[in-house]
Image (cartoon, rainbow, N blue to C red):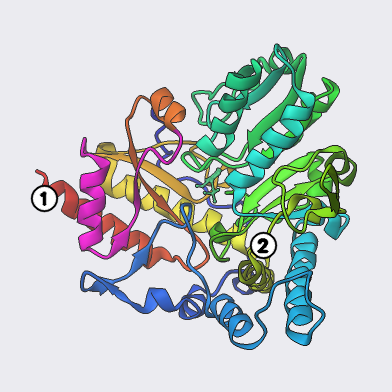
Amino acid sequence: MAMKPAESPEVMAVRPDESELLDVETIKKDFPILDQQVNGRRAVYLDSAASSQKPTAVIAAMTDYYETTHANVHRGVYTWAEEATARYEASRGKVRRFINARSDAEIIYTKNVTEAINLVSNSWGRANLRAGDAVLLSEIEHHANLVPWLMLADSLGIELRYLPLGDDGQLDLTDLDRLVDGVKLVGITAMSNVLGTITPLERIIEAAHAAGAIVLVDAAQYVPHLATDVQALGADLFAFTGHKMLGPTGIGVLWGREELLEAMPPFLGGGDMIRDVRLDGFTTNELPWKFEAGTPPIAEAIGLGVAIDYLQALGMEAVRRHEVEITAYAMRTLTERHGDRLTIHGPVEPSMRGGVLSMDFAGLHPHDISQVLDSHGVCVRAGHHCAKPLMRKLGVGATARASFYVYNDEADVDALSDALTDAADFFG
Ligand SMILES: Cc1ncc(COP(=O)(O)O)c(C=O)c1O
């Protein structure tokens, strides 16, 4: 299934004031990696959906922590240990404010969004699901929100149902009420990493709650790009990952409603997650530490806090506006220039999607495209994007995917476009 973009998608009904747009030229200077050449060309990084680049402020905060005050957290009562704990916990407060959670107790640090979802499937899933119970997912999920449930289906015998993808690149909600009936949990992406589709979360959450199910949102592609208010969205569990939002690798977040997290058993066992341990049993620590066994990713949490500072200084409304603008520019100019040789999967309307363009181009293999693009300094992802069931649904084995973030501008899109022309010429 291939969805062609409209000839000239409208960017926005009202163009924003210049002052409300991102100053990408200045932003680029904050990202030292972008100052490099790749294969003798200006680096054009178009793979932020896989992992974003990091501003100097994030790298510096992590280095400063290691150079000035590294010690383990929640343990020592000496100055460095107390300062490390203070920085680690201050970052949690930044995350809470960024997504408008009610309390720090609701912010659990994990390794990434994958671990956050595994935490839910193992903790909530094993405590609440029995053979024959149903979980509703969708056909556009990343493997991170499929495999943990497939594993649970194998071991517990639960039933998995799937919301289908419609021809317009949106989820088809025609059968939502029937599919959600009797379901105990709905696990849904907020934005597809392949199609850019922004899913109708409110509608799905409303139907799930009416059916008595809780909702877990995979917000890996959403939180980096859109202002997030977990209380307003009304989900029960919300997971995202630091490295896609200008933060370091090795840190993710699970937000959950406090009473739900309270009722969930611990996931990993060990130090820090306990209140007391005897040889015949243990009691668990309070939230959020009940779910943070062992030495946590301290520098990474600090780095994530600074990434959030950076995004907030830009303003999430401006971040989203920029994404819609650059996506519209890319869809319009790539389509105009490459015509029928190019198929862009997903919704045709830029304001209905994220800045992720999965492309089929001139019948070429995505790996071949990616190699030619690399010789132009243009970095895109080629492959199945950890969404094999979706690839099957689209009838492709792989796509070449360009994805945009705050440091990309129209010149980056033009470089992609030139490199695509070269790929077509090279492979005849
Ligand atoms: C929608 C979505 N979910 C989950 C993930 C997994 O992220 P991580 O590898 O950080 O756990 C990704 C990463 O590409 C993603 O795009």
Up-down: is 343 above or below 302? above
The residue that disc 2 covers is: 296
Q: Nearer the viewer, residue 247 or 108?
A: 108
Residue 126 shown left or right of residue 263 in the figure:
left
Find out whether residue 259 is within the magenta segment. Answer: no
Q: Is residue 219 visible?
A: no
- Local packing at callout 1 (Cα closer than 10 Å; few below 14, some 14-19, many 20+) is few
Q: Considering the image in quadrants, where does the N terminus appear?
A: top left
Q: Nearer the viewer, residue 269 or 70?
A: 269
Residue 324 shown left or right of residue 44 in the figure:
right
**At 43% from the left edge and 38% from the top edge, which residue is drawn?**
6
Query: Label 2 is placed on what type of residue?
Result: Pro
Please tell me which of labels 2 and 1 falls first in the chain. 2
Q: Is residue 71 visible?
A: yes
Q: Position of residue 397 (x, y in %)?
A: 32, 31
Where disc 1 sits, the SS reads helix
Residue 270 shown left or right of residue 218 in the figure:
right
Q: CA distance from mark 2 to mark 1?
A: 49 Å
Q: Position of residue 231 (x, y in %)?
A: 84, 48
Up-down: is 353 above or below 148? below
Range drawn in magenta = 362-387
Q: Considering the image in quadrants, where does the C terminus appear?
A: top left
Q: Nearer the viewer, residue 284 or 354?
A: 284
Q: Residue furthest right?
A: 259
Of tags 2 and 1, the one toward the viewer is 2
